[in-house]
Amino acid sequence: MSEMRITQEIRLSTSGRTDILDLTPQVSRIVQESGVSHGEVLLFVPGSTAALTTIEYESGVLEDLRAAIERLAPKGIPYAHDARWGDGNGFAHVRAALVGPSLVIPFQEGRLLLGTWQQIVLLDFDNRPRQRRILVRLRGEG
């Protein structure tokens, strides 16, 4: 078998303000339809006010995550970025940097190897709605 590499993109609209969107169905579909049977999928969100992680996509834990992020990088304090640029989203840049812009997830037989309660999520921290792209790169064997 030869190594295969496939790159696709997920595009979506967000509301910002720590919007958390489940990407698992879209990523699963890309993996299943790719013809790559086993390997890994790299996910990357371009931009400095959004991030990717995994979590149980359940309302209670999502609220807990929002509250924890608010404690780590609160909205209501001064940020040097805001003083310089005046756009009011310094907190969003810090939050995104703490979580990170990318994930790598293995897959086998066309299925993501996620835990039972683990989903892939995009977190949009910006202070306004955005159009986001998530780059999806598969590497593996057919």
Image: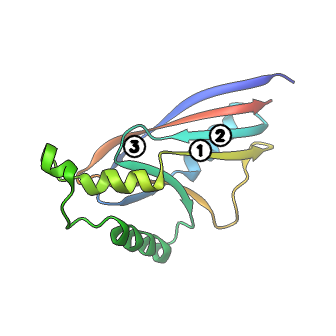
Under mark 1, the amino acid is Val
Q: Residues within 10 Å of mark 3 (few under 14, many from 20)?
A: few
In terms of depth relative to the viewer, which is nearer, 24 or 138? 138
Q: Nearer the viewer, mark 3 or mark 2?
A: 2
- Direction from residue 97 to residue 102 in the image, left or right: right
Residue at image x 56%, y 36%?
Answer: 136
Residue type pointed to by label 3: Leu
The dot on residue 27 is 1
Which mark's residue is nearer the viewer, 2 or 1?
2
Q: Position of residue 56 (x, y in %)?
A: 57, 67
Q: In the image as oriented, which residue stretches furthest toward the right?
A: 1
Question: Dividing the image into 4 quarters, which one contains the C terminus?
Answer: top right
Q: Position of residue 105 (x, y in %)?
A: 66, 47
Q: Is residue 11 visible?
A: yes
For residue 139, side relative to residue 8 (left or right) = right
Q: Is residue 81 above or below residue 73?
A: above
Q: Tell me whether the residue at label 3 lies in contact with that at label 2, contact meaning CB atoms closer than 8 angstroms.
A: no
Q: Quadrant of residue 85?
A: top left
Helix, strand or loop under label 2 = strand
Q: Residue at x 20, y 67 (%)?
A: 76
* Residue indicated by mark 3: 12
Give the residue displayed 45% in from the left and 41% down from the top.
Answer: 45
- The reply to whether callout 2 and callout 1 are in contact (CB within 8 Å) is yes
Q: Gap in Å between the C-alphas at discs 1 and 3? A: 13 Å
Residue 74 percent location from the top left of the image: 28, 67
Taking the view exactly as shown, the residue that stands out farthest to the top is 2
Give the mark, 3 or 2, whose residue is nearer the N terminus.
3
Q: Which mark is residue 41?
A: 2
